[in-house]
Structures are given as structure tokens and as C-alpha cells.
Amino acid sequence: MPTTLEKTALLPRIGRLMQDHRAATAQHPRTTLLVLTAAMRHMTRSETIKFLSAGTRTGKLATVRADGRAHVTPIWFIVDGNDLVFNTWHTSAKAKHLARDRRASLVVDLEEAPYAYVLVEGTVSISHELDETRRFATRIGTRYMGTDRADEFGARNGVEGELLCRLHMDRVIALDDISA
């Protein structure tokens, strides 16, 4: 059982956590608070975008199979406004799933302490427009392969049959400092 002194020391931290939660839910109004502990903190919208854009973290995209089971696959993506943009071949499993059911979820996580993740849920729009596909494939290549190989990636993935997909961020849960 914590002493009065220990309880008093926790009050400022709990107050900050509640402020963080109110700020996060104001920016992501449909965000549901799953767990509130003294260890984790909701990210603001700008922190969420920065987290999603940092380095070369892959996203784990979940789509719905015809029989209702989930299909999860790693993807490369970039943030463009309120969308996460990725490309896929028209005969891939994810392309087939998304053609039938546009709902998808994507999680990006920090796999080391203090641990963090962003979960995005929404619908996906699909474009067959070749110039747009090539332009975004090049931007994705820049992020994951560097500027020296970006054009190569854009040329390889900016071809007829490659689809440009935009996951609209309809619902976002973004938690930081999970183990702090």
C-alpha cells in the first residue's frame, strides 16, 4: 500500500496523463481510451504523424479475407495529409481483399523500450493512375531505400498493374512510453 508521501508524488504525473489523454481525444475524437496507467501516454496528432514518418519502420497492414479471417502483411508507406499511402500489385492478396472490402487497419510500433505504437483504422481508396503511382512509389523508395535508389524503386513499382492505395485515418490510437 503506497504511503501518503508516495501518493502525493504521483498526483502531478496522473494530472499530466489526464491532460495528455484529453488533448489526444480532442485531436482524435473517436479514439477510445483502452487502458490508463501511469506508464503510458497518448500521442498528440503531430507526435503521431512524426512517429509514423520516422525512419524506416514498416507498417503491418490487416485486411479482411473473403472468409472473414484477418490477413496481415508488412508494408512500406508514407504519410500524405490524413492518409497512409502504399502500393501493391493488382493480383496480391491485399489488393484482392481491398477490392472486395475497403476496410483496413495498420499498426506501426517501436520495438524497443520505452515502446510505442500507432494503430490506424479506416477505409482504403485505390488508384490505377500510373503517373501518381510512380510519383508515390518514388517517395516511398526515398524513405526506405534512400535517395540514391528512390528512382529505381519508383520505376520498378510505377508500372501498369501496380495500385496506389490510400488508407484514410478514420480512427487512430497512438500510445507512447508504454514501459516508462
Image (cartoon, helix red, strand yellow):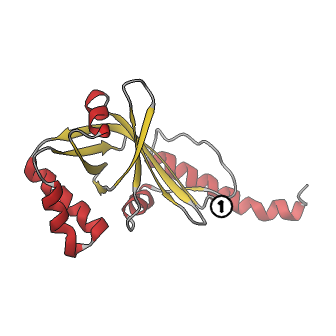
Q: Which residue is mark 1?
A: 179
Residue 45: quadrant of the picture? bottom left
Give the quadrant of the C terminus. Answer: bottom right
Who's the residue at 21% across and 62% down the image?
139
Residue 159 x/y as whole percent: 11, 51
Write the residue at 40% across / 53% down: 59
Q: Nearer the viewer, residue 84 or 77?
A: 77
Residue 106: percent from the left, percent from the top?
41, 46
Percent position of residue 143, x then y: 29, 66
Q: Amino acid at mark 1?
A: Ser
Relative placement, left or right, of 23 versus 123 is: right
> Height in image: 121 above or below 151?
above
Q: Point out the image quarter for the N terminus.
A: bottom right
Q: Nearer the viewer, residue 132 or 24?
A: 132
Q: Residues within 10 Å of mark 1 (few under 14, many from 20)?
A: few
Side (left or right) of 126 relative to 67: left
Callout 1: helix, strand or loop? loop
Q: Residue at x 15, y 51 (%)?
A: 133
Image x and y of residue 149, in percent: 21, 71
